[in-house]
Image (tube, coloured by chain):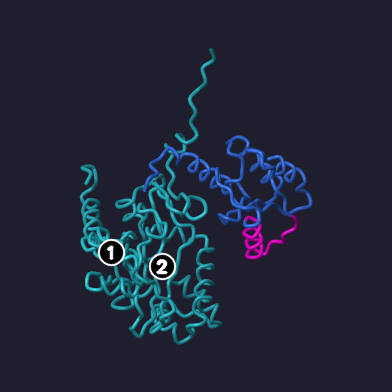
Chain colours: A cyan, B blue
Amino acid sequence: MSLYLEKNESELSKKFLKNGYVILKQKNLTNLKYIRSLIVKNSAKIIGIKKPNDKISERFLNNIHKDIKIKELNNFRLKIIKCINEDKDFKKKYFDIAKDLLFALVGNELAMQSRVNLSIQLPDDDSSLLPVHSDIWSGDSPFEAVVWIPMVDCYSTKTMYLLKPDKYKKIHKNFSKYIGKSSLEFYKSIKNDVKWIKVNFGEILIFNQALPHGNVVNEENETRWSMNCRFKSLYSPYGDKKIGEFFEPITLRAASKIGMQYHLPKIND
Amino acid sequence: MGERVPQNIQNLVIRDFCEKNNLFYNLSASEYSMSNSHKILDQIIGELKNLDGIVAYSVFQLPKDNKKRYTILTQIIKKNKKFYFALENMKLVNKDDLEKIENIWLIKKTLPDCLKII
């Protein structure tokens, strides 16, 4: 690691490289609570009920499967995504929650995904599965990192899994052997090497999306709610997801603005 | 900006954008295919009086030249009209929007000079 990184930044970097992810507990829950309240408010509005009190937000979200049927889930989810992304403070708060981690692990001149995603995984629902995949294999840039924020406690089959970096090396080396397999076969072949990441509300997860990850049927009796958003260093290589259409600059610095507009003066002969 | 999408696909994206944003899609116009031409865009801006604004397929269809682009965008704001960019889901209404668009353009123009091989 660079000698000029702060001690805590070096430690975070080492953890991120070794495990493929870092979890950070938030000292201040104000922004997280704002986001959760926004989601609860919009969910209640779509369902057609009064917004539940903030004290029972987590219980309301955990039990949303009692109000939403599996066939209604995707429309419900898309409506909430639209509402939260239209909120003028939402994205800034999302970034602020992860700012220290991002500055330490990704950089301080950043591009952020234009629309934050939301996953809702009802118990026993096999229609919302995310089979094992690496985002890079389908066009993302390996310079991106995903900030994953749960709105409820996520554990066991209610959370996501990530293949450990040291185990990934084997897949990378023998990729052609795995590429022909179905997602299920692929998952079975790495099942014993994945890490199920327990993340509670109040904590945030940042992970390396190049590592194979996914979820399985949620066998818990609560619904999973989590958001995910990609961040990258502004001037690092882009994959299929470009600046403007997918990413937007969020922390453009003054020197860059000067540099990008600078032209050497002309000399007349 | 070196990218070309077939016109029928551009129209589909624009129509979809208008539907989602409750905009009335009045008429469509195609720019001359000569490199760096913005003649049709200039013409539409001159005739904006009876329209709410313009929906373009992409923000990167604006002129590459910084001064020319800035002039066009400020004209829209001065005329109190709106300029939407369907692919990027962006709109230009005020100076903050102008700054956002300009930043994206400056970065896009700088990226070819940055590391690009994955």
Task: Kindly identify the amino acid type of the residue bearing the numbered disc 2.
Answer: Met
- Residue at 47% x, 80% y is A52
Which portion, as a residue range, is magenta? B10-27
- Residue at 50% x, 67% y is A84
* Camera-side residue of A51 and A231: A231
- Residue at 35% x, 54% y is A142
Q: Quadrant of residue A190?
A: bottom left
Tell me where residue A35 appears, x and y as whole percent.
44, 67
Hey, which residue is sitting farthest top in the picture?
A269
Tell me where residue A93 appears, x and y as whole percent.
43, 60
Q: In the structure shown, which secondary structural element does the residue marked by tag 1 occupy?
A: strand
Q: Which label belongs to residue A227?
A: 2
B15 falls in the magenta region: yes
Label whose residue precedes the other's in the sequence (1 or 2): 1
Q: Give the chain letter at badge 1.
A: A
Q: Give the chain letter at badge 2.
A: A
Q: Quadrant of residue A178?
A: bottom left
**In the displayed structure, would residue A136 be above or below residue B115?**
below
Q: Is residue A30 left or right of residue A84?
A: left
What's the magenta bit mostly, secondary-structure-wise? Answer: helix
